[in-house]
Amino acid sequence: MTGSATGLTTGLSDVRRRIDAAARAAGRDPSEITLVAVSKVQPAGRIEAVLAAGHRVFGENRVPEAAARWPALRERYGDVVLHLVGPLQTNKARQAAGLFDVIETVDRSRLARKLAEVFAATGRALPCYIQVNTGAEPQKAGVLPEAADAFIAECRDVHGLPLAGLMCLPPLGDAPAPHFALLRDIAERNGLAGLSMGMSGDFETAIGVGATIVRVGSALFGARDYG
Ligand SMILES: *Cc1c(COP(=O)(O)O)cnc(C)c1O
């Protein structure tokens, strides 16, 4: 843990060091990997500590929570880049398009169509990732692996979304590497460069498989307190 200007400690320099080491071990350039600091549920002081330490790329999983805190933080730290990493309801697509810079969770036709409409109306098209439910878990968002090629083509050719890549969230308790490899294979055969995969427990594994974005929460901020 490293001190910061706010007096709170963060895991930022430790996580960065681990990202660099994992990239080098995989023969990759660490600058190819974006660290998204997932700040959901974290108290303001911890987020400010990570901002004060110089980090600017954050992720939130709920639109209302992002709306409550990030507009004010953006005013103070102008170069923030905010990723939506949680499910997006179609009726919140317009609000999300105004709050976020990257949407990582496009997973169905209705949402893709709605985002395309919103981007056209606002003239601001956000880079989008398609979430793939690599474990085919019924309770989890994401397009099924066998439906991914067709959905990617639809997002590109029918809706004209600016697709940057794919995102996944492997099942808890599964070895993550096969899920990361599945995501990488789908991306490769569809000509997509971006791979958002890996969290606090497995980001080094994800980097070994080719992650370009790792989404790290608790290892950076400390454990989330849902109480
Ligand atoms: C919460 C969350 C993360 C970060 O999880 P940690 O295990 O705390 O690193 C990453 N991705 C998504 C989609 C999340 O909801």
Image (cartoon, grey):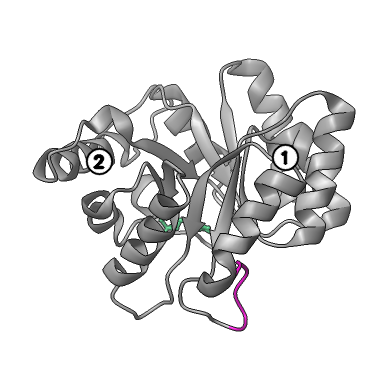
Residue shown at the point (28%, 75%) measured from the top left: 175
Is residue 19 visible to us here?
A: yes
Q: Residue at x 57, y 24 (%)?
A: 80
Task: Give the class, few, some or many, for how many residues have Cα within 10 Å of label 1's Cα (few <14, many ≥20).
Answer: some
Q: Residue at x 80, y 41 (%)?
A: 116
x and y percent of residue 106 in the render?
Answer: 66, 54
Q: Please state the horizontal and vertical placement of residue 154, each as a whole percent of the image.
A: 69, 54
Q: Find disc 2 in the rendering and name its residue.
A: 1
**Image coords of residue 200 (percent x, y):** 34, 56
So how many labels did they put on this image? 2
Q: Quadrant of the N terminus?
A: top left
The foreground one among 137 and 96 is 137
Q: Please, what is the three-letter code of the amino acid marked with disc 1?
A: Gly
Confirm if mark 1 falls within 8 A of ligand 1: no
Element on which disc 2 rests: loop
Q: CA distance from mark 2 to mark 1?
A: 44 Å
Q: Earlier in the sequence, mark 2 or mark 1?
A: 2
Q: Which mark is residue 160?
A: 1
Would you identify the image quadrant in which residue 201 lies? Answer: bottom left
Chief secondary structure of the magenta portion: loop
| Amino acid tagged 2 | Met
For the residue pair 166 and 57, the one nearer the viewer reads as 166
> Is residue 141 shown in magenta?
yes
Q: Secondary structure at mark 1?
A: loop
Residue shown at the point (76%, 60%) measured from the top left: 109
Q: Height in image: 40 above or below 186?
A: above
- Is residue 65 depicted above or below 179 in this figure? above
Expressed as whole percent of the image width and height from the top left, the position of residue 101 reads 64, 32
Bounds of the magenta segment: 138-143
